């Protein structure tokens, strides 16, 4: 049924880069047998899902939506993929994204532009735009995305689904193609908060293959699916609801505040005064890390190879200049620049200090409050082509999502209304480190 749906819808929406039809049928049959003979018992058993194309799947192309990796077939599964398979999940295919997860609209994909299912002239958000659009359009029951600076939450908000960026270290990054390693986290995109808890249960947990993976035992997140926010302390930063935010988004967030208050939560306006520094801090650190993570694509070991090279240097240079798209090149250059000897102290080192201060500000707020709420993005889904030629404007729109990655916190995006054009609006709920439970409990209010 899901495969039929992909067949009929995906030529229009272009969510998938690869559809794994044959493998899906085989997997489904195998899982059915295991359910029948009682050897498999998981709420995810037999449920069809899709995976962002920067998460490695054994024997199935993993392209990062780049020409550079268009022929790359990983010899291993990412930790999260293995966990989902162990739970009987059925893989439908690999989902479109911005090239190497660099972007906010899925327009930088080398292969195709995914459309927003609510209005096909608009972007689905990004970089996990294929994942969010597929879930919203019913081309997958759920999907995995990755979030370095908002790439799960922002497309979830643009497409009206639920997207969770877990605490840094809760979900293994083994097998996720690295963009900015100190920010990257894998997380679920789902239709409901309940599904979000179920998928998180399956993918969270320690993995010795990721040195940043936490060893703490994680709780059963479905235990948080209770309708009770009485006494919860909620901070609403005034910087999150000022007039840089589209009016109907502000109204929707304030309405959510009212809903929480009516249910007995204590909502208070707070201030996070460092908000003007979060975007520059994020982009300096993310691009610095990206420039060295992407240094490995030299055409020699794997990936795209330039034809008829003159010599080794020509081979390496042309493989990279032909293999990477414009946005990726821009970021490698900027990242190399902020790390270069004359500028390291002025940019990179300063950004690391700012990171410490931003983290401290959030932790200070969390001494008083259980969660912080606000918008996911200052706008709803915009038109395809509208912002692609103004990268700085596009970067600025990440203002509400990047602080969460800078501080390593967990945050969810849930649908909380529609704007005047009937486009979905996302509410962001940010929690303390490793306190996904409280986020899910608060989010469940809106289920
Ligand atoms: N839009 C942000 C960026 O381009 C976030 C991307 C992401 O989270 N992968 O870096």
Image: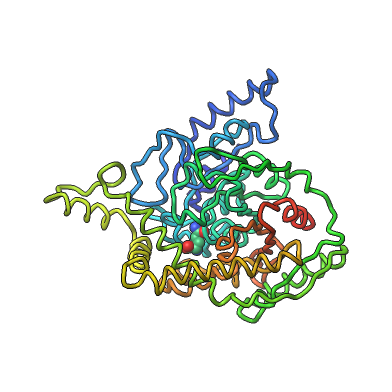
Q: Where is 121 relative to 175, above or below?
A: below
The residue at 67%/72% (across/down) is: 249
Q: Where is 59 relative to 172, above or below?
A: above
Looking at the image, residue 253 sits to the left or right of residue 207; the answer is right
In which quadrant of the rendered image does the C terminus lie? bottom right
Looking at the image, residue 132 sits to the left or right of residue 267; the answer is left
Q: Which residue is outermost to the top?
A: 37
Which color scheme is applied? rainbow
Instruction: Examine the image and state in which quarter residue 285 appears.
Output: bottom left
Residue 250 on image: x %, y %? 69, 74
In which quadrant of the rendered image does the N terminus lie? top right
Q: Looking at the image, how many numbered discs can be counted on the residues?
A: 0
Residue 235 on image: x %, y %? 74, 69
The residue at 37%/69% (across/down) is: 344
The residue at 46%/67% (across/down) is: 283
Q: Which of 6/164 is in front?
A: 164
Residue 373 on image: x %, y %? 71, 66
Instruction: Examine the image and state in which quarter residue 416 appears.
Output: bottom right
Asked whether the viewer can see residue 104, the reply is no
Q: Where is 114 relative to 348, above or below?
A: above
Asked whether the viewer can see residue 369, the reply is yes
Q: Where is 241 relative to 23, above or below?
A: below
């Amino acid at each position: 049924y899901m495969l039929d749906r992909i067949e009929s819808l995906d030529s229009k929406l272009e969510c998938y880069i690869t559809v794994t039809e044959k493998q899906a049928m085989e997997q489904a049959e195998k899982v059915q047998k295991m359910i029948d003979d009682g050897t498999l018992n998981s709420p995810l058993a037999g449920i069809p899902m899709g995976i962002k194309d920067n998460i490695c799947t054994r024997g199935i192309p993993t392209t990062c939506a780049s020409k550079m990796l268009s022929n790359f077939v990983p010899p291993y599964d990412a930790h999260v993929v293995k966990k989902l398979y162990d739970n009987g999940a059925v893989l439908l295919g690999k989902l479109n994204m911005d090239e190497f997860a660099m972007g906010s609209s899925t327009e930088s994909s080398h292969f195709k532009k995914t459309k927003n299912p609510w209005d096909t002239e608009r972007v689905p958000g990004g970089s996990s735009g294929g994942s969010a659009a597929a879930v919203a359009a019913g081309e997958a029951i759920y999907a995995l995305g990755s979030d370095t600076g908002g790439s799960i939450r922002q497309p979830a908000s643009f497409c009206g689904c639920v997207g969770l960026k877990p605490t840094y270290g809760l979900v293994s990054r083994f097998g996720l193609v690295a963009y900015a390693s100190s920010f990257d986290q894998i997380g679920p995109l789902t239709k409901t908060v309940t599904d979000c808890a179920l998928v998180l249960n399956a993918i969270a947990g320690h993995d010795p293959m990721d040195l940043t993976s936490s060893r703490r035992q994680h709780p059963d997140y479905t235990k948080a699916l209770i309708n009770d926010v009485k006494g919860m302390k909620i901070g609403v930063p005034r910087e999150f609801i000022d007039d840089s935010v589209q009016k109907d988004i502000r109204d929707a967030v304030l309405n959510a505040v009212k809903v929480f208050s009516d249910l007995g939560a204590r909502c208070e306006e707070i201030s996070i005064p460092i908000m003007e520094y979060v975007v520059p801090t994020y982009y300096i650190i993310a691009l610095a890390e990206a420039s060295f993570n992407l240094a490995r694509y030299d055409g020699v070991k794997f990936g795209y190879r330039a034809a008829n090279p003159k010599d080794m240097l020509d081979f390496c240079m042309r493989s990279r200049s032909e293999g990477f798209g414009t946005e990726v090149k821009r970021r490698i250059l900027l990242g190399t620049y902020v790390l270069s000897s004359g500028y390291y102290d002025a940019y990179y080192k300063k950004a690391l200090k700012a990171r410490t201060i931003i983290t401290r500000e959030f932790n200070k707020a969390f001494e008083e409050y259980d969660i912080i709420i606000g918008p996911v993005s200052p706008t709803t889904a915009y038109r395809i082509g509208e912002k692609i030629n103004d990268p700085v404007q596009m970067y600025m729109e990440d203002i509400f999502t990047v602080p969460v990655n800078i501080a390593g916190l967990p945050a969810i995006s849930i649908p909380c209304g529609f704007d005047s054009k009937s486009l979905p609006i996302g509410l962001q709920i940010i929690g303390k480190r490793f306190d996904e439970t409280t986020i899910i409990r608060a989010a469940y209010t809106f289920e």
